[in-house]
Structure formats: structure tokens, C-alpha cells
């Protein structure tokens, strides 16, 4: 059996995907303002999953400055799809919209300002992907709406499931016959935090 790479974390940190000027600026803003972002590894994973699924319609819960939505939006642009992202902070939503315009994605991403649960109650589907990155206490309350809004075979991606507040959500997914879920304990360079849980769940 081959030996493991010495210092795995540093080796994988060096493999983090390259980013353009806009993404690097958003990363620097996040460091300066202490805005939690998914980082380039998770971002590239979102892009790969959306492209692999040929996703036509994507829903994001939690926009912040738009870092993760840019990755998903770029996938939607290539599939000629569209995405909706929900953000309850008006100032953050305004910043995100400006960033989408800079990225050339304003025609592919629509921002809705409001509480995720309240906005989801008014929405119809189906969506191909739902990416969840809101307050972890809200993960479980919106889970039923995620199931309603996703198409059969659609993908739920939940970030930060290593947080204690996501425990009920993790259990609900694992115990439900309506989802086929896998929880991954992950090392995600430049993610906030770098050691966290990630959940991928197929809507049955």
C-alpha cells in the first residue's frame, strides 16, 4: 500500500483552484469584514456539481456578498439556466447584485430580499439544486420546503453541517425516507471554517 502524502492539509491547500480578480477581492473583503464564505474549493465543487447535473434552475439560501452565487451562476450561464438567491440583509443583497453585474451574471441571477423560510413558502418549483448556507438554526425548519421545491432526483447541498446548530437537520435527513443523504467531514482550504461538515442529499 502506498504511503499517505506528508502533511495532507498543506498539500491539499496548494491544490485550491485558481480564482479571478473579483473572487480574490471578495475573499479579501470577507477576511477584513469577517464575512463567512465558502472559499474556492467549495465554490468549485458547487460549479462542478451544477455543471454535471446540467442544472437549469438553482436556488440558493443565503447570498451575503455573492461569492458562492458567482460559482453557481457561472454554471447556470453555461447551461443557459438561471438561479434565485435569497438574502435577508438588504445591504448585503445590494452588494451582491453589484458583484453579479461585475461578473457578467446579472442576467442569470435574481436576488430576493427576505427571510428564507417566509420566501420559500411563497415559491414554486421545481429546482434542480438547492444550496443551503443560512443560519444553521434555520436548516431544519426549511427542509420540508427544500423537498417540495426540488424536483425528484434534485440535489440539496448544505454547508456548515459540522455546526452544533445543524444537528437536528443532520438527523432529520439521515432518518427520512424522502432523502438519500451523505454527510462528509471535510477539510476545505480557505473555507470558513476549514474543517467542517458538508451534506449532499438526493431528493427521493
Image: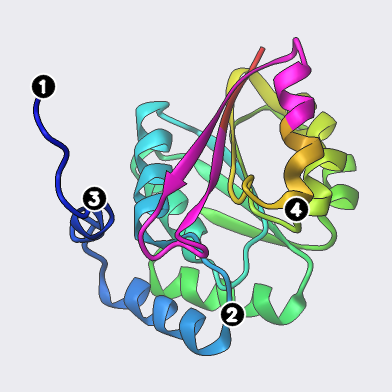
First along the sequence among labels 4 and 3? 3
Is 87 one of the magenta-colored residues?
no
Kindly check if marks 4 and 2 are in contact, taking CB atoms under 8 A apart as contact.
no
First along the sequence among labels 4 and 2? 2
First along the sequence among labels 1 and 2? 1
Q: Residue at x 71, y 82 (%)?
A: 91
- The nearer-to-camera label among 3 and 2 is 3
**Gap in Å between the C-alphas at discs 4 and 3?**
29 Å
Vertical relation: 90 (above or below) 177 = below
User: Which percent across, then down, holds residue 113?
Assistant: 77, 65
Q: Residue at x 76, y 29 (%)?
A: 171
Label ID, residue 95:
2
- The nearer-to-camera label among 1 and 4 is 1
**Gap in Å between the C-alphas at discs 1 and 4?**
40 Å
User: Which percent across, then down, holds residue 180?
Assistant: 62, 16
Kindly check if marks 4 and 3 are in contact, taking CB atoms under 8 A apart as contact.
no
Q: How many marks?
A: 4
Residue 191 falls left or right of residue 169: left
Residue 11 falls left or right of residue 98: left
Q: Circle 1 is placed at which residue position? A: 1
Is 182 one of the magenta-colored residues?
yes
Q: Circle 3 is placed at which residue position? A: 8
Kindly check if marks 3 and 2 are in contact, taking CB atoms under 8 A apart as contact.
no
Label ID, residue 136:
4
Secondary structure state at the residue bearing disc 3:
helix
Boundaries of the magenta span = 171-199
Q: Nearer the viewer, residue 169 or 46?
A: 169
Kindly check if marks 3 and 1 are in contact, taking CB atoms under 8 A apart as contact.
no
User: Which percent across, then down, holds residue 181?
Assistant: 60, 22
Amino acid at each position: 500500500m502506498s504511503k499517505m502524502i506528508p502533511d495532507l492539509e498543506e498539500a491539499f491547500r496548494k491544490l485550491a483552484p485558481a480564482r479571478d480578480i473579483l473572487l480574490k477581492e471578495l475573499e479579501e473583503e470577507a477576511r477584513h469584514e469577517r464575512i463567512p464564505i465558502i472559499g474556492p474549493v467549495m465554490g468549485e465543487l458547487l460549479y462542478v456539481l451544477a455543471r454535471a447535473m446540467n442544472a437549469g434552475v438553482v436556488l440558493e439560501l443565503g447570498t451575503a456578498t455573492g461569492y458562492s452565487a458567482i460559482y453557481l451562476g457561472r454554471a447556470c450561464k453555461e447551461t443557459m439556466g438561471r438561479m434565485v438567491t435569497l438574502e435577508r440583509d438588504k445591504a448585503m443583497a445590494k452588494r451582491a447584485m453589484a458583484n453579479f453585474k461585475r461578473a457578467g451574471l446579472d442576467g442569470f441571477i435574481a436576488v430576493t430580499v427576505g427571510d428564507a423560510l417566509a420566501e420559500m413558502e411563497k415559491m414554486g418549483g421545481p429546482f434542480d439544486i438547492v444550496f443551503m448556507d443560512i443560519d444553521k438554526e434555520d436548516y431544519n425548519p426549511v427542509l420540508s420546503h427544500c423537498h417540495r421545491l426540488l424536483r425528484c432526483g434534485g440535489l440539496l447541498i448544505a454547508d456548515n453541517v459540522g455546526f452544533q446548530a445543524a444537528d437536528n437537520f443532520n438527523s432529520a435527513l439521515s432518518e427520512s425516507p424522502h432523502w438519500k443523504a451523505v454527510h462528509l467531514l471535510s477539510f476545505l482550504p480557505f473555507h470558513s471554517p476549514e474543517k467542517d461538515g458538508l451534506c449532499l442529499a438526493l431528493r427521493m
